[in-house]
Image (spheres, coloured by chain):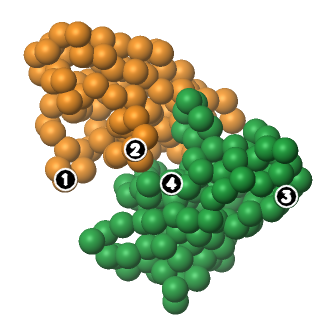
Amino acid sequence: QSALAQPASVSGSPGQSITISCTGTTSDVGGYNYVSWYQQNPGKAPKLMIYDVSKRPSGVSDRFSGSKSGNTASLTISGLQAEDEAEYYCSSYTSSSRYVFGPGTKVTVL
Amino acid sequence: EVQLVESGGGLVQPGGSLRLSCAASGFTFSGFWMHWVRQAPGKGLVWVSRITNDGSNTIYADSVTGRFTMSRDNAKNTLYVQMNSLRVEDTAVYYCARAGKGHFDLWGRGTLVTVSS
């Protein structure tokens, strides 16, 4: 199972919106609405930010939103804040009943 | 408090074995499927394995199939992974994670496994 494709880095100024893409295939992202996004700070465990493409867990800011079109899912962070600086990973369920992650995107707040 | 706490990591020689544990608390452990996910130093997350809530079914990534065995003891609220024939490329922080439907909704802090001679 090949990893999903994500940009290595995305940056933005405070208050701006940024979008991180996550591209897979019809066997994963395109075939299921089981795309999720995780935020990871250095030395910390990942934290679930979005699940089922666009749902937010309780406690996650509504500045985070998710969407999907075809084989590409996206995470948008609106009103970018310094605390959003972290690594972000997408994940998808796959047709082999396994899971696949993207390589991660480093978000930098300028 | 709802939490997962991994243990059992350490330094092991190539070809060696190690068993990791993950203690769950604050929720009904027996009601959830569970996963192991690993992260090599400076690298991304990689899914390793999944077990059903009653332990009757497991599935593994190709890279660990035949070498790793995932199990659980619901009476002890503990998840395990037995890792045999370890390779240098198995070096990683190993996280246990609680399964949501199609996602991982609770993560432990991880335990570091280093495979080196």
Provide residue B11's location: percent of width, then percent of height.
72, 53
Chain letter of mark 3 equals B
User: What amino acid is labelled 3 in the image?
Assistant: Gly
Residue for badge 4: B110
Residue for badge 1: A58
Q: Are marks 1 and 2 on the same chain?
A: yes
Cα gap from disc 1 to disc 2, whole angstroms: 20 Å
Q: Are marks 2 and 3 on the same chain?
A: no
Residue for badge 3: B16
Cβ–Cβ under 8 Å for marks 1 and 3:
no
Cβ–Cβ under 8 Å for marks 4 and 2:
no
Chain letter of mark 1 equals A
Q: Are marks 3 and 4 on the same chain?
A: yes
Q: Secondary structure at mark 2?
A: loop
User: What amino acid is labelled 2 in the image?
Assistant: Lys
Tell me what hue chain B is rendered in. green
Residue for badge 2: A44
Tell me what hue chain A is rendered in. orange
User: What amino acid is labelled 4 in the image?
Assistant: Gly
Chain letter of mark 4 equals B
Residue A85 higher or lower than B1, as above or below:
above
Provide residue B28's location: percent of width, then percent of height.
38, 79
Mark before the other along the chain sequence, 1 or 2? 2
Cα gap from disc 1 to disc 4, whole angstroms: 23 Å
